[in-house]
Image (cartoon, rainbow, N blue to C red):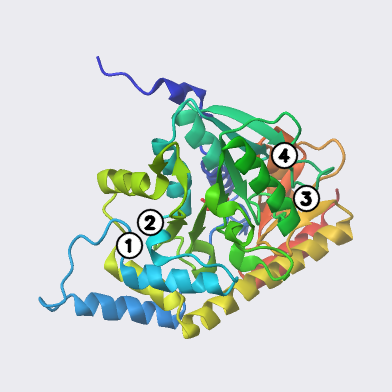
């Protein structure tokens, strides 16, 4: 008799952003005149830059011709894109070889799928609060989960504690949801911990494009010793507006082994079973995003969102609420008035300011009392949201 994966019963009923979407839909059906401003899910809103759309048009036209037609691509991605990503790492003083790069359809899928090749007897360490995908994927695959607390006291940047044990460690910096960013010395503590304990760090760098301060690392590979214990996930979603197009990559250093096996080879085996690669047109678009013109155009978009983040941070500061993020990150994470729970505050913002936010408790119990705001909306909506926030009574 067919049965469902027994681990599914340990999941929450819905993915967090589905709950939020349902709440917003319900509100709008009861209040059709409300002008909701969406600051919940971190989805980009600016159009694709012209160099990217041109590359997609050219690539599809190329395939009109039998000589240039392409079917299945390489499971690990086309070399032209892997070479360009490898060059991008040089901007951060990091050497990553093209062969160490595995192109995929999303950092979210990579973050979850990597668990396919890691024993379910391994313990997974995640922060509380955490991007729900690390937790839900670990629950589904039956991995044991340990938490490390991220709180106001450690500015939402927890470090390895004494007696901590973990085989797999998820680190996201700039962090989703808190917007906090690890510096080099702090990341070194995690790398040293992983090397001593023979653990694997899964470093999610999906928001690295938002880092401006030169003392903050964009990549785990800026940290000495990381090539022996870390893999990195990165994406074109937030840096180049690809949330709907889908293109990302995983970096697995050649020397990285799990037991006696080379992790890159094992991952490629997994990908060749379950994945048929990212389309040629999409990879050409990603290549265009990494061209000098593409970098300039996409940086303008990142700066636009960063201006929104500043507007929101200033409003929160004026209101006197404790917050992190908003500087090297598109997310602002703030603590509401004393005693107010996250979902209460979510409802209050929805009703009084018509703002859709994300309740901090949806990311873990340490998020209780907090709200996450996304800066990926339009400038006009962000200004309006800041005004509304400052005008309601807390
Ligand atoms: C978020 O809002 O946390 C992100 O958009 C979700 C994602 O990137 O999957």
What secondary structure is marked by label 3? strand
Disc on the earlier residue, 3 or 4: 4
To which residue does mark 3 refer? Answer: 334
Q: Whole-percent x and y of residue 206? A: 55, 58
Mark 1 vs mark 3: give the one in front.
1
Compare marks 4 and 1 and give the one earlier in the sequence: 1
Direction from residue 59 to residue 307 in the image, left or right: right
Secondary structure beneath label 1: loop
Q: Which mark is residue 104?
A: 2
Indicate whether 90 appears above or below 153. Answer: below
Image-quadrant location for residue 390: bottom right
Whether tag 2 and tag 3 are in contact, CB under 8 A, the answer is no
Which residue is more in the foreground, 128 or 363? 128
Residue 131, percent from left and from top: 59, 44
- Look at the numbered discs 3 and 4 and tell me whether their residues touch, using CB distance below 8 Å: no
Of badges 4 and 2, the one in the foreground is 4
For the question of whether residue 230 can be seen, the reply is no
Q: CA distance from mark 2 to mark 3?
A: 33 Å
Q: Nearer the viewer, residue 50 or 82?
A: 82
- Per the image, label 2 sits on a secondary structure element best described as strand
Residue at label 4? 160
Say which of marks 2 and 1 sits in front.
Answer: 1
Q: Earlier in the sequence, mark 2 or mark 3?
A: 2
Q: CA distance from mark 4 to mark 1?
A: 35 Å
Marks 4 and 1 close (CB-CB < 8 Å): no
Distance from label 3 to label 4 (Cα)?
24 Å
Q: Ligand 1 closer than 8 Å to the CB at disc 2?
A: no
Label 4: how many residues lie within 10 Å, few (<14), some (14-19) or many (20+)? some
Residue, disc 1: 77
Nearer to us: label 4 or label 1: 4
């Amino acid at each position: 008799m067919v049965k469902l994966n027994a681990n599914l019963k340990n999941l929450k009923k819905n993915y967090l952003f589905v709950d939020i979407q349902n709440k917003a839909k319900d509100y709008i059906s009861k209040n059709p005149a409300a002008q909701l401003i969406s600051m919940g899910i971190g989805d980009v809103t600016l159009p694709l830059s012209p160099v990217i759309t041109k590359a997609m048009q050219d690539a599809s036209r190329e395939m009109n011709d039998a000589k240039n037609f392409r079917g299945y691509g390489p499971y690990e991605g086309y070399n032209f894109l892997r070479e360009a990503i490898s060059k991008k790492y040089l901007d951060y003083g990091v050497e990553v070889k093209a062969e160490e790069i595995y192109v995929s359809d999303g950092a979210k899928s990579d973050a979850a799928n990597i668990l396919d090749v890691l024993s379910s007897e391994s313990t997974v360490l995640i922060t509380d609060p955490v991007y729900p995908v690390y937790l839900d994927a670990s629950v589904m695959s039956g991995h044991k989960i340990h938490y490390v607390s991220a709180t106001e006291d450690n500015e939402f940047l927890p470090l390895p504690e004494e007696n901590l044990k973990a085989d797999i460690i998820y680190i996201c910096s700039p962090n989703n949801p808190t917007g906090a960013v690890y510096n080099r010395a702090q990341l070194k503590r995690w790398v040293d911990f992983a090397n001593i304990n023979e653990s694997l760090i899964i470093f999610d760098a999906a928001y690295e494009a938002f880092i401006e301060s030169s003392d903050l690392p964009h990549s785990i590979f800026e940290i000495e010793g990381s090539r022996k214990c870390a893999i990195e996930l990165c994406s074109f979603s937030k840096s180049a507006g690809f949330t709907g197009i889908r293109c990302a990559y995983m970096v697995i250093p050649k020397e990285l082994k799990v037991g006696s096996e080379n992790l890159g080879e094992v991952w490629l085996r997994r990908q060749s079973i379950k994945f048929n690669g990212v389309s040629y047109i999409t990879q050409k678009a990603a290549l265009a995003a990494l061209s000098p013109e593409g970098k300039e155009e996409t940086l303008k978009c990142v700066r636009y969102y960063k201006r929104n983040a500043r507007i929101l941070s200033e409003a929160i500061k004026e209101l006197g609420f404790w917050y992190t993020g908003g500087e090297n990150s598109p997310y602002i994470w703030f603590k509401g008035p004393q005693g107010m729970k996250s979902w209460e505050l979510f409802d209050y913002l929805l009703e009084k300011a018509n703002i859709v936010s994300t309740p901090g408790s949806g990311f873990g119990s340490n998020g209780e009392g907090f709200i996450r705001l996304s800066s990926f909306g339009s400038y006009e909506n962000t200004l309006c949201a800041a005004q509304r926030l400052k005008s309601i009574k807390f």
